Amino acid sequence: MATRLFDPRSLRWKVAALVALACCAVAAVIGVLVHRAADRSGERAGRELAASQVAAAEKEYSLTGTRPAFADLRTAADLPAPLAQAVADLRTPGAYALWYDVKAPNWYWLWAAAPVGDDKVIVVRTDMSAQVRSLQLLDRSMVKAALAALLVVVPVAALVAERMNRRLRHGSRTARRIAGGDLDARIGRQGRARDEITEISVAVDAMAGALQARLAAEKRFTADVAHELRTPLMGLVTAAGLLPEDDEAAGLVRTQVLTLRVLVEDLLEVSRLDAGAERARVDEVPLGELVAHAAGQAEQSGQTGQSGQGGDTRLRLEAPAVVPTDPRRVERIVTNLVANAHRHGAPPVEVTVTGARITVRDHGPGFPADLLADGPQRFRTGAAERGRGHGLGLTIAVGHAAVLGAALTFTNAPDGGALATLDLPRPPAPTDLRDT
């Protein structure tokens, strides 16, 4: 949580950085404008002061013939060159010349000079250092004010963005739940905000609702078709049983009718699992005996397609546990896994029971990439090298595992072959009352 809080890639800090950048830009523009306005105002005030002083000095000199104490009387040659040139350029009687003498950082003088005849020039100097220091103090004050504003604005922007972050994170979590199969999950409308996030939330909820309705329609269709097929199928099974035993065509018909019957029964089982109405009937089960019986049934029932060859299924028991579970569902899962291994893999098929874990491994080409990525899909076997089939066996196994609260995972062994692992939930260890 702390890592996510201080993650610079987070939208929270991107918004805060954008607000800080905007504040800095505004402060810079305002600071430049205020600096220029204050500078011009100070310079204007200095010019007006210098003009009034040189006018007063010129008037007093013309009346008394002596220079006032606040002015100097110089010749044109004694003036700084820029000021002397400005005085020489004067053409209007009573006019005066100004020159701003700047030698940073400590020399700021505004000179005012007016000719008084006989190559004499009355000169007044005004110290502008106070105005310059005032301007520098104003600049520092604006910088401090901008930093103080940032210290307030950035956390406030981060807090405001956090509410938006929470809404986005809630939306992403809900989208992941929907992608994981929870089609009842909805983002919902939080608060009264009517912004783009609300529009995305409404769109995702509408998409989830439409997807849920479409999948429900497909499940209903599958269940209805299976139920509708069941009655004529039983008639076919009965009719096939009346055919001659020694007729090759009759044998082929019986085989295909049996295959169709298994398919319909699988479809009905899938529809029941999809409906979510299945409940486990838990009992204490010795896992080793149950798996041995299920593996033997899978091989003897003819579902493996191996003509009942002995030694194709190898069972290994490593301290099998007694677990509380539904034996019928565990047997169904193991039967389907072993049958799938024989049908799509290569012998030998190894079934191992270790504690509450059951693994089924073959030595064929392994599970295809799309099955490893997306899990088993009905009516899709994944790859030609895995053989043909309707893809319901693993789907049913996953459904029963979900009812049991068990974890069924599909991987490929490092040295080749498909590996299915069923981890059954174990009861909590008994508490020793002497330790309490």
Image (tube, helix red, strand yellow):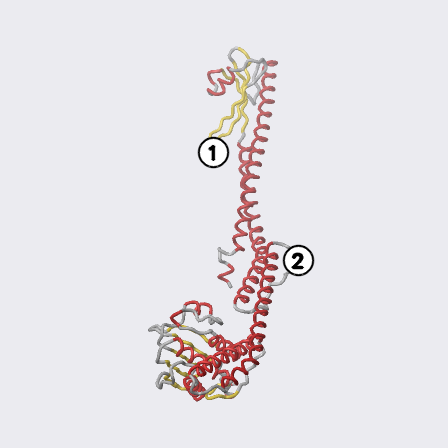
As drawn, the residue found furthest toward the right would be: 192
Residue 409's image quarter? bottom left
Between residue 206 and residue 308, name the one nearer to us: 308
Q: Is residue 253 visible?
A: yes
Hey, what amino acid is under mark 2?
Arg
Q: Nearer the viewer, mark 2 or mark 1?
A: 2
Q: Give SS at disc 1.
A: loop
Hey, what amino acid is under mark 1?
Pro
Q: Position of residue 347 (x, y in %)?
A: 35, 79
Q: Position of residue 362 (x, y in %)?
A: 37, 77
Residue drawn at x 43%, y 79% is 337
Q: Position of residue 309 (x, y in %)?
A: 36, 85
Residue drawn at x 39%, y 79% is 342
Please, is residue 210 above or below residue 72 in the view? below
Residue drawn at x 61%, y 16% is 59
Please, is residue 116 above or below residue 403 in the view? above
Q: Give SS at disc 2.
A: loop
Label 2 vs label 1: CA separation? 58 Å
Q: Position of residue 398 (x, y in %)?
A: 49, 76
- Crowding near the residue tagged with mark 2, few <14, some 14–19, many ≥20 C-alpha atoms within 10 Å: few
- Which residue bears the numbered disc 1? 105
- Which residue bears the numbered disc 2? 192
- Crowding near the residue tagged with mark 1, few <14, some 14–19, many ≥20 C-alpha atoms within 10 Å: few
**Which of marks 1 and 2 precedes in the sequence?**
1
